Amino acid sequence: MSTERASDRAYASLRAAIVDWELEPGTVLQEVEQAARLGVSRTPLREALSRLASDGLVEPLPGRGLVVSAFSLEDVAQLYELRAALETHAARLAAARHRAEPFQELEAAFTRVADVLDDDDEAHHGYYALVARFDAAIDEAVGNRFLVADLQSMRAHLARARRLSRRSQQRLTSAAAEHLAIVRAILDGDGELAANATHVHLSNALRSIRQTAPAAHASEHD
């Protein structure tokens, strides 16, 4: 296996562990331990850690090396400020530049998804997979690699934010309806309506996180 492939594998594994909170904020990432756990040498591990630092998922801590970066409700609020700027603009562009077929398929999928959502983990995973399809369709439609790169970088942090709050069937059902409104506005070619629907969705998502996040995450981690 090449160094590049080993680095990619280490990066993907560590990124997933951080996003899923298997590696919690403040966790020290010892090179020897992580290299052994991932089955790679220290050179590709360092490359992977460098990429994670660029993503903002790990950060240096004097005397301890690299640690998983802190993530609190204050961070979530700042993240959603960025998300509002990027995603509302992306929705406008998607309304003007999209191909109809992917969004027609999404319209049908989001119409059905509310009927099958329940408290089952599999149903929730299916919903998040559908949201990933929505994100991919937006990325393709905007046709701007710089904007897409920023959107994709932000999504790892959004996944961390999702883990701060308790999952709610009611919220997922509402979110599906909000995504459906965005999709229909894009299909209609109405950029302002797509942007406004996106703003409503983001406002509701942030409110849900604030209302349901455990008190332990209300301030910065030590």
Image (cartoon, rainbow, N blue to C red):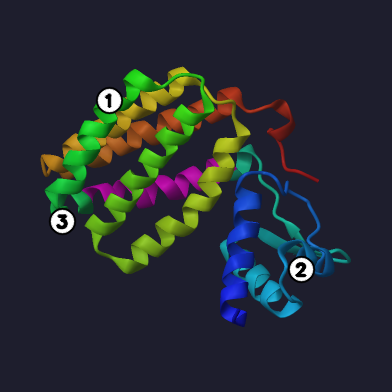
Can the viewer see residue 193 in this picture?
Answer: no
Crowding at dot 2, Cα within 10 Å, few <14 / some 14-19 / many 20+, comes out as some
**Disc 3 residue type (three-letter):** Arg
Q: Is residue 34 above or below residue 183?
A: below
Q: Amino acid at mark 1?
A: Arg
Q: Amino acid at mark 2?
A: Ala
Q: Residue at x 53, y 44 (%)?
A: 159
Q: Secondary structure at mark 1?
A: helix
Task: Say whether disc 3 or disc 1 marks the residue closer to the N-terminus.
Answer: 3
Residue holding disc 2: 35
Q: Which residues are magenta?
A: 76-92
Is 213 situated above or below 154? above
> In the rendered image, which residue does mark 1 sit on?
112
Which corner quadrant holds the N terminus?
bottom right
- Mark pair 2, 1: CA separation: 44 Å
- 19 left or right, relative to 84: right
